[in-house]
Image (tube, rainbow, N blue to C red):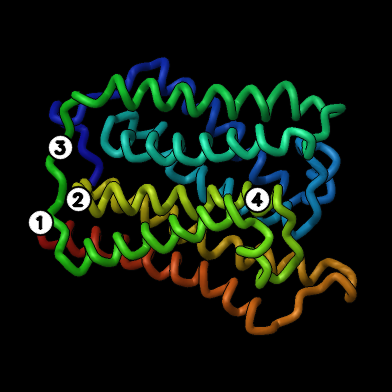
Amino acid sequence: MFDTSSENPPISSYLRFVTAVECFVVLSAAVLLFFLPDLGKSLWAWDIPPFNARFVGAIYFAAYIPLVIFWYTARWTPGRLVLWMIFAFTFLVMLVMIIHWDAFAWNRISTYLIFWPLYIFLPIHSAIFLFKSRETQKPAASNLTSTWRTALLAFALLGGLYGLGMLFFPEQSTSFWPWGVDAFHARIYASAFITPAVGAWILAQRGGHPSEHFIFGLNLISGGILPILGTLWTNASVSAERQIQYDLGTWAFFMLFVVSTLLGVAQILMVIRSHDKSQ
């Protein structure tokens, strides 16, 4: 599944080192916010309530999976797709940071020594390596069926449009969510929808190597299941007056992530079946 032939050149040791650092930071943030939200509230770069903390932690766990596979394989395929997703995610967060600079806790080390330097460095760094690798040789992509291409395009368009809605109309776009979401958090969350939309668009347009579809599937599954689990876990641990209502809006919220999970599972099954046929 993961091509280690000469047709798939390795990334530089420098890029692999930066990816390793990013893996460490992302995993640390994911563990802190998802498993220790109370501690995370005092250490994070902004004041982050429990529902928001576990949701952001879930996003980081979903981001960690492609990153660690990229670091481990250290090849341009699937590395190039992962870099595009890193660029999309970090660039969007950087924009939101600049717009909502006053939402940050500037008396915390995590704000000015970790969060801001990281999210200024990473989009620029990713863009440079995407440009440098534009002519890099890559293994042949798999042939997508018209059904799969349509499904990926539909996911990209719907996810992308919803993410853009969260950027431009943040409070209106999240009005049905189970907990109250302010404009700052809604815009931060937009990256969780636009980033997989970018990945789906790339795969739909040019097809992808099996390793790319596999990584993308894992990202969708984790990005679908973990936000639901985080919401339910937080709901069970907060006081009664802060618990969510299981109304139509809440079920619509859950369905957003169920769709992501199902598409991710389908991607994994597609890769497994393709691999079995090639044996």
Q: Residues within 10 Å of mark 2 (few under 14, many from 20)?
A: many
Estimate the spatial distance between the alpha carbons at disc 1 and disc 4, rounded to whole Å.
39 Å
Residue 39, image x, y percentages: 83, 44
Residue 196, image x, y percentages: 42, 52
Q: Amino acid at mark 4?
A: Val
215 versus 25 height, above or below: below
Return the disc, 1 or 4, that comes first in the chain's sequence.
4
Residue 267, image x, y percentages: 31, 61
Estimate the spatial distance between the alpha carbons at disc 2 and disc 1, rounded to whole Å.
18 Å
Q: Residue at 38% of width from left, 48% of height from top?
A: 198
Front position among marks 1 and 4: 4
**Secondary structure state at the residue bearing disc 4:** helix
Estimate the spatial distance between the alpha carbons at disc 3 and disc 1, rounded to whole Å.
16 Å
Q: Which mark is residue 207?
A: 2
Q: Residue at 75% of width from left, 29% of height from top?
A: 111
What residue is shown with label 1?
278
